[in-house]
Image (spheres, grey):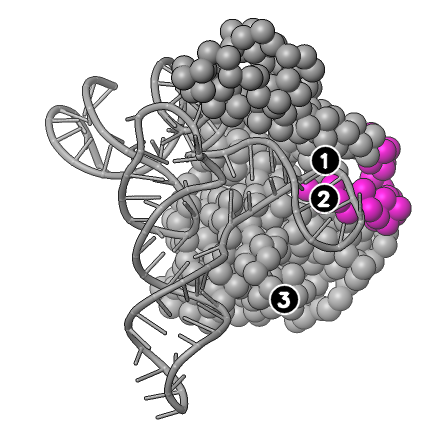
Amino acid sequence: MLDIRLIRENTDAVKQGLARRNFDAGVIDEVLKLDEKYREQRTRLEQKQAALNAASKAVGNWMGKLKKDPAAPVPKEITEALGSTPKGPDEAREGLRLFGDQISNIDRMIGEIGVEIDNRLRMVPNLPSPHTPVGKDETGNVVRKTWGEAPKPGFAPKAHWDLGKHYGLELEVGGRISGSGFPFFRGPLARLERALVNLYLDFHTRENGYTECWTPFMVRRETLVNSGQLPKFEEEMYQLGKGDELYLIPTAEVPLTSVHADSVLDKDHLPIRYCAFTPCFRREAGAAGKDTRGILRVHQFSKVELMVTTTPERSEEEHETLTRCAERVLELLELPYRRLELCSGDMGFGAQRCYDLEVFAIGVGKWLEVSSCSNFGDYQARRARIRFKDNDKQNKLCHTLNGSGLALPRVMIALLENYQDAEGRVRLPKALHAYYGKEVL
RNA sequence: GGAGGAGUGGCAGAGUGGUCGAUUGCGGCGGUUUUGAAAACCGCUGUGGGCUUCGGCUCACCGGGGGUUCGAAUCCCUCCUCCUCCGCCA
């Protein structure tokens, strides 16, 4: 979430940033009003609390003295807290009890205001970086680079949903078992899935210095709040019932971001780079009917995720590096792609800057998003309390970044469609030969 | 699933109702000593928030939440996590 102090002190800049995201900044004024009230009451509470603490301490001393001298005077702390002089210790205790109740009431009220502020703040997206192009929606995205050429076969290329039938793409089976959007692969595609995962992980761990992680696929609600999926995207999430209160992860970003939640990291250990293979579960609630043929958009898919925790000074640089790591996978697979820089209006909730990688698949004739590389700045770190000890010995918030490296289904689509020949054979790129065990699918 | 035990500052580990935000050790920082280093000795060393005349003042935090009490690390309830043993099962 955003820094309340930033909102307080740079209100206009915050509002302008949010406006670039088409976010109604009205909630900012509400937050500011609540914040003012919060601080006002907090000061009041602390004064009373201090008086009570002093008086409570004095009670102990006083009782000790009373044992030796029944005429020991009432300590001034008690008189000050109560606003009057009690006749004896019993009256003092009774008075302090009431005083304490009063304090709890204020405390409760402050707590409620705090929750109100938090709830609102959690719904406010991150501010776009100054580098982020300004735009309303996906039409404002900017193509930063294009790599490779889409093959131009001398025949009409088939889409993967037709081609895939020969290689074990059995959507009806998945549908029967679980429902639509849960693909079932038998034989070649199942093996290709495994080959791709291995290639990705080997590449990122051996060449790019990422540490491989294996994470839980179900997480607590709190974990989703840390990385920003909740409370905003409740309807996207699969949740387990029967009192388990667990959610299926929509991406490995979720568990990976929480690895260092609530900790102060050693600056010398940064940046920390993790990669993890996990299945991802998404309801895709908002995207009904859009690009759903074949395995273009599914409820369960595999992905290798890259995640970096670093210092603010390094995050821009790490963002470029991370994006390059994802791009190089596409280059290894010799698939044509382009890098889009998302504009302010199209960026994900927590991102301050984001690149999407899209691969071109000739069967469907479309650019398909296979990776989204985001720099979250300190937005996630603030929620998850991920900090580092800086040279000046201050604890500061880390910056977090992540990106897919890569998502499987759409890469499979591109492999099938771009590498097909007139007879429907699919010749695999060199990098996959050893992993797949054959040169053709 | 059953029975026990434990969660305290960067780490280790005291503390069972008041003067404890917390003894001590290690680590870290600064200093004395030394040609330099080590050793020894001395001092400092948690986090988050509010107020501030920027000198400070103050509140909260001993796994999370709630309660008892004038007062809780300490007592009670509850949840979470870890460990040990038993059972069951990949």
Whether the magenta-drawn stretch holds residue A12 is answered as yes
Nearest the camera: A264 or A295?
A264
Residue A235, image x, y percentages: 63, 28
Tell whether label 1 touches label 2 (CB within 8 Å): yes
Q: Residue at 51% of width from left, 7% of height from top?
A: A90
Cα–Cα gap, marks 2 and 3: 20 Å
Find out whether the residues at labels 2 and 3 contact each other: C-beta distance under 8 Å: no
Mark 3, residue position: A314
Residue type for callout 1: Leu
C-alpha span from label 3 to label 1:
26 Å
Q: Is residue A61 visible?
A: yes
**Are both tags, 2 and 1, on one chain?**
yes
Q: Dot 1 corresponds to which residue? A: A121
Crowdedness near tag 2: few (<14), some (14–19) or many (≥20) residues, C-alpha within 10 Å: many
Magenta residue span: A1-30
Name the element at disc 3.
helix
Q: Are the residues flagged by discs 3 and 1 in contact, CB closer than 8 Å?
A: no
Which comes sooner in the sequence, label 2 or label 1? 2
Instruction: Name the amino acid type tagged 2.
Output: Leu
